[in-house]
Amino acid sequence: MTPVSRRTALRVGALSTLAVGAAACTPAPAPATPPAPAPAAPAPSGLFTLGVASGDPGPDGMVLWTRLARDPVHPDGLGGMPGGPTDTIDVDWEVAADQRFAEVLQRGTARTGAELGYAVHVEPVGLPADRELWYRFRAGGEVSPAGRTRTTPAGPALSPLTMCFTSCARYEQGLFTAYRRIAEEHPDLVLHLGDYTYEYGAQPSGSTPVVRPILGDEERTLADYRRRYAQYHADPDLRAAHAIAPWLLVYDDHEVENNWADMVPEKPDPDFPARREAALRAYYENVPLRANARPTGASMRLYRRVAWGGLVNFHMLDTRQYRGDQPCGDKYPSDCPERTDQARGLLGAEQESWLLDGFRGSTARWDLLGQQVMLSQLAIPRDGARVYNPDAWDGYVGQRDRVVNGWTEAKVRNPVVLTGDVHAHWAADVKTRFDDPASPVVGTELVSSSIASGGDGSEDRPETAGVLKENPHIRFFNNRRGYVRTRITPETITADFRVVPYVSRPDAPAETRASFVIEDRKAGLNRT
């Protein structure tokens, strides 16, 4: 059967496959008796209903964020704040060496207003390196909750790092308990690797039950996107995770719309440039990014490098804004000659060059790629053939080869790929040639499951054994929700795949399903 292009028609039903890439659109089977939708958690009152956050830490500062909203889900997207072009409010901020703010190190005032969605981004500088710090805001006689943040080590210091990473938080498909469990880990840093929000309206999604209501229809306008972010930030578990540590974030597709590729939407849409502009603007307003990421029209510079002393270089990638259109008509799963076209890319030429230059110049003990879609080959056996996810790196084999060869030729000491998107935990050895079992292991990929997307999930799926047999470089799979907790030292990275057994009801514990160690200068996974 000839694949039907997503550019000319809607998809024609979900395929029952292991959850990968576009499997981010293939939900796990629903329980026999779906739970009744939970009521939305009430938000606190006042100006600071959306909490506080910090991000992109450096050795002498970071970005501090809040957004003012008295009525987070007001339809105008401004959170019940005044909407005139000249409506502004001054917001005081301070950073302290202690949680009681007895020793304030810096303070200042930022102005925000309707034009900024009442968001505040502050970038203090001159703070002491490698220190735990506390911050808060004041406005209109009210004081925000305090947030915990930190600066990175300076220069070549090899201070150990505890880092958690995750992705994919579809609000209506589950509670954000995994965010609460991340907060309880007290990490030094949190990475969010995309699908921070979802653009869908309140319609049902396949067999995944609705756990709690999402407000509004499919997002298209700036007000739509702002309101969606506000509903997310009103969630107490997300607020707790933001307040505990600085974050590094990159978007994937659902912050705009499913499977967008540069200026090509999933389905024909003459208004897509305006929609993308609104989505990127709302994304910046609602997460702790530095001012150099602020969008210009429908574009923003999101890819960047963040160093943790001499221990880690984080190469944070953007695999949406510059990619070529998905091959094979974006039919999942599928195969076609375009998939292996050497000219195809997820990163675009400029970002690829930037990444390869970063490999050549790195002196870090560990080089971590924070990115969105699965890099390792995932061949799915189907009717005697092998098919792939064209939305992941399997659809852009030429550029994948150049990236892997780039870190190999640059003799990167310890390359590790961190991935989201696929609503399941995976761990894989990265090889120079995935189809050749004898080819060397030259890196490692750790893939986090989702916060809530896909509902409760399962320990396994019927297809798992066959898929793992077809892909011997893949060492682990689990289909529950959760996050990955890492402990990074000069000698090792220890990765614990943490799961919450359910998201359809409150108070799920966090449990470790598998742990792996990556040793310095020894690419590949060792299960503990």
Image: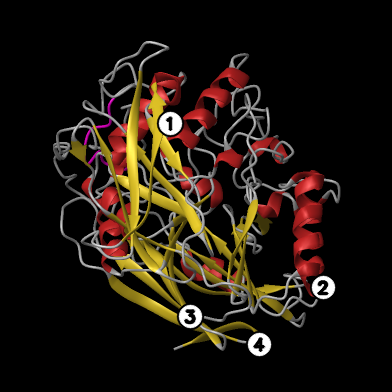
Which residue in the protein does label 2 denote? 410
Which stretch appears magenta?
Answer: 207-215
Examine the rendering and report whether any part of residue 207 can be seen: no
The percent coordinates of residue 305 (x first, y second) are 64, 58
The amino acid marked with disc number 1 is Glu
The amino acid marked with disc number 3 is Pro
Of circles 3 and 4, the one toward us is 3
Instruction: Looking at this view, name the residue that lies furthest to the top.
Output: 84
Which residue in the protein does label 1 denote? 199
Q: Nearer the viewer, residue 24 or 496?
A: 496
Q: Quadrant of the C terminus?
A: bottom left
* Sequence-wise first label, 2 or 1: 1
Label 2 element class? loop
In magenta stretch: residue 62 = no
Identify the image quadrant of residue 411: bottom right
Of circles 4 and 2, the one toward us is 2
Q: Quadrant of the N terminus?
A: top right
| Separation of marks 3 and 2 at Cα, in angstroms | 25 Å
Label 4 element class? strand
**Mark 1 closeness class: few <14, some 14–19, many ≥20 residues within 10 Å:** many
Q: Residue at x 17, y 32 (%)?
A: 46
- Residue 523 in the figure: left or right of residue 109: right
Of circles 3 and 2, the one toward us is 3
* Sequence-wise first label, 4 or 2: 2
| Separation of marks 1 and 3 at Cα, in angstroms | 37 Å
Indicate which disc residue 522 carries: 4
| Separation of marks 4 and 2 at Cα, in angstroms | 16 Å
Tell me whether the residue at label 3 lies in contact with that at label 2, contact meaning CB atoms closer than 8 angstroms.
Answer: no
In magenta stretch: residue 214 = yes
The percent coordinates of residue 84 (x first, y second) are 37, 10
